Image (tube, grey):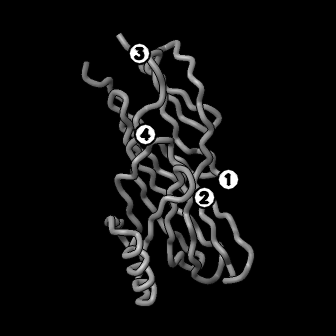
Amino acid sequence: MRRLALSLISFAALALPLTANAQLERPTIRGPLMVIASEPSGPIEKVGAKTVDIQVAIVGRLAETRMTLTFGNPHGRALAGDLYLPLPEHATVSGYALDIPGRMVDGVVVEKHEARRIFEKEIRKGIDPGLVEWTQGNVFKTRVFPIPANGTRTIMVRWVVPLAGDAKGAFYDLPLNFPDPVDLAVRIEARAGAG
């Protein structure tokens, strides 16, 4: 019979051993970060999330994670920002949403060139677009505009990932290495898979 145990390790990775004595090496995953430039040619500023809500559903050796992040703009004018979210190895993004006044709006997948064209067109119309891209490694990046003056924007990213591990057990990594203090809510549901 398998026992499930949950432990939070240094707020850097969340581990879910599927066996009590699993001795597995846990890779370090850095957390989400919004990068903004307060002036078009000015210095870059790193802005940490204000609130983070995470929901994880683990079934057997597969995990689906939904991370909702709210970032603030401390400046007196609207800004654009780039969210960088390192994902676990072998993760596949399965959903993305951006807050459009009063509600979360799901994104759609289009070819990269077409996405860039639509993004630029929507900015010229003053509409709040979001553009999602993969950067180096397994880093998810999305452009957010506008982040209102002294206001906030909320982004939701959902991904699916097989659990890392071996015959001794498996673990789940969650990017929780935030640069600033954050209001964090985490909910994890785990069930053994069939078999």
The earlier-in-sequence mark between 2 and 4 is 2
Task: List x then y, in percent, for residue 166.
Answer: 47, 21
The earlier-in-sequence mark between 4 and 1 is 1
In this view, 119 is above or below 155 = below
Name the residue that disc number 3 marks. 3
Mark 4 Cα-neighbour bin, 10 Å: few <14, some 14–19, many ≥20: few
Q: Is residue 150 left or right of residue 123?
A: right
The quarter of the image holding the C terminus is top left
Q: CB of mark 1 within 8 Å of CB of mark 2?
A: yes
> Can you tell which of label 3 and label 2 is closer to the viewer?
2
Cα gap from disc 2 to disc 4, whole angstroms: 21 Å
Mark 1 Cα-neighbour bin, 10 Å: few <14, some 14–19, many ≥20: some
Name the residue that disc number 1 marks. 179
Q: Give the residue type that dot 2 points to.
A: Leu
Cα gap from disc 4 to disc 3, whole angstroms: 19 Å
Q: Give the residue type that dot 1 points to.
A: Pro
Cα gap from disc 1 to disc 3, whole angstroms: 34 Å
